[in-house]
């Protein structure tokens, strides 16, 4: 399983419009951050490759072209804020040739789109995200002229349909929704797992846009992760925030999960990539388990746009 960070920035992105701060105006490539999104791929036993996108922010079209996304099996949404959702219409290029048996059981889209193939691409999210998306993109679900100009979306409530006992299966990947809180907004983290070349279960946990992760959600990750190769976690800035983890809060959650690598995402322009690396280094003594991970060669620090990581390889 391979995982590409297509965006690691906060809702403004970096550089921020009209900002002249040192981070927004420097020339360092790792300080140029699009809005948060990720592309997950897996080479299947039959030789085919499956692709999954996590979040479709306003730059999704740019990200899809930049990272060469040519097909999609599904979309996983974390929540419905604009920086994670507003590129959803650009899924339509993929959605008109997709068939999902899960969609077929829930809603018949073929009758609404007789000019195209398939039942539509599955979009997995929690109940509140689905409700917001249907409201935000209401034109998709209204009768309009024939022409294929709208995406065919099949929303599926991940928390209702999937659990540790019955995970979502997409190709050889096993996927679990992980409830997290983004202030007062219920958001969704995702635990993606595969069988590694060593025959063991390997996972990547993606937990963006959160300031609170319950013990029950942490326990779901612990009990289901096998070997946690990577933890990707919201870490907005050094100072505390009402809806996002600070660097230290992210490190505290990471210490509880003990992954092999820790990557910060959803980063704002308060600190440069180098400054965040230095902050982590200066504070590792507060987290003995993370310090041990670093001493064993693991990475603990900020992710950046274009970073590729893998699990089970």
Image (cartoon, rainbow, N blue to C red):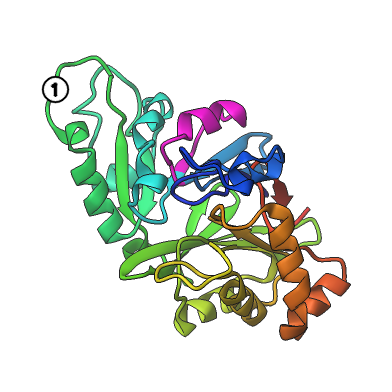
Residue at x 56%, y 64% (from the top left corner): 237
Residue 195 horizontal side relative to residue 175, left or right: right
- Quadrant location of residue 142? top left
In the foreground, 61 or 283: 283
Residue at x 45%, y 70% (from the top left corner): 241
Would you say residue 62 sits in the magenta stretch?
A: yes
Residue at the outermost right position: 296
Q: Main secondary structure of the magenta part?
A: loop
Would you say residue 289 sits in the magenta stretch?
A: no
Q: Is residue 5 above or below residue 158?
A: above
Q: Position of residue 194 (x, y in %)?
A: 65, 57
Q: Which residue is mark 1?
A: 144
Is residue 101 among what the camera can see? no
Q: Is residue 248 above or below residue 7?
A: below
Residue at x 70%, y 71% (from the top left corner): 259
Give the residues drawn in magenta, as a range: 55-74
Residue at x 66%, y 80% (from the top left corner): 255
In the foreground, 253 or 42: 253
């Amino acid at each position: 399983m391979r995982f590409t960070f297509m965006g690691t920035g906060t809702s403004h992105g970096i550089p921020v419009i009209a900002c002249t701060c040192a981070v927004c105006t420097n020339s360092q490539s790792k300080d140029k951050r699009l809005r948060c999104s990720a592309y997950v791929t897996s080479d299947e036993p039959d030789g085919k490759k499956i692709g999954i996108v996590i979040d479709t922010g306003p730059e999704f079209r740019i990200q899809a072209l930049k990272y060469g996304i040519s097909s999609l099996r599904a979309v996983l949404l974390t929540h419905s804020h604009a920086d994670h959702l507003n590129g959803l219409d650009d899924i339509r290029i993929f959605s008109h040739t997709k068939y999902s048996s899960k969609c077929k059981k829930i809603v018949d889209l073929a009758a609404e789109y007789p000019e195209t193939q398939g039942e539509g691409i599955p979009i997995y999210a929690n109940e509140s995200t689905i409700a917001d998306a249907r409201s935000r993109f209401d034109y998709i679900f209204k009768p309009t002229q024939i022409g294929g100009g709208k995406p065919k979306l099949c929303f599926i409530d991940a928390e209702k349909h999937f659990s540790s006992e019955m995970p979502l299966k997409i190709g050889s990947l096993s996927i679990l929704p992980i409830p997290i809180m983004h202030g007062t907004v219920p958001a969704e983290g995702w635990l993606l797992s595969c069988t590694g070349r060593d025959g063991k279960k390997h996972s990547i946990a993606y937990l963006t846009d959160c300031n609170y992760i319950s013990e029950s959600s942490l326990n779901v990750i612990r009990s289901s992760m096998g070997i946690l190769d990577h933890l990707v976690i919201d870490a907005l800035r050094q100072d505390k925030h009402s809806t996002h983890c600070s660097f230290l809060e992210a490190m505290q959650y990471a210490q509880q999960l003990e992954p092999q690598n820790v990557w910060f995402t959803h980063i704002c322009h308060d600190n440069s990539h180098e400054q965040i690396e230095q902050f982590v280094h200066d504070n590792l003594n507060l987290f003995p388990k993370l310090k041990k991970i670093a001493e064993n060669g693991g990475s603990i620090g900020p992710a950046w746009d274009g970073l590729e990581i893998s699990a089970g390889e």
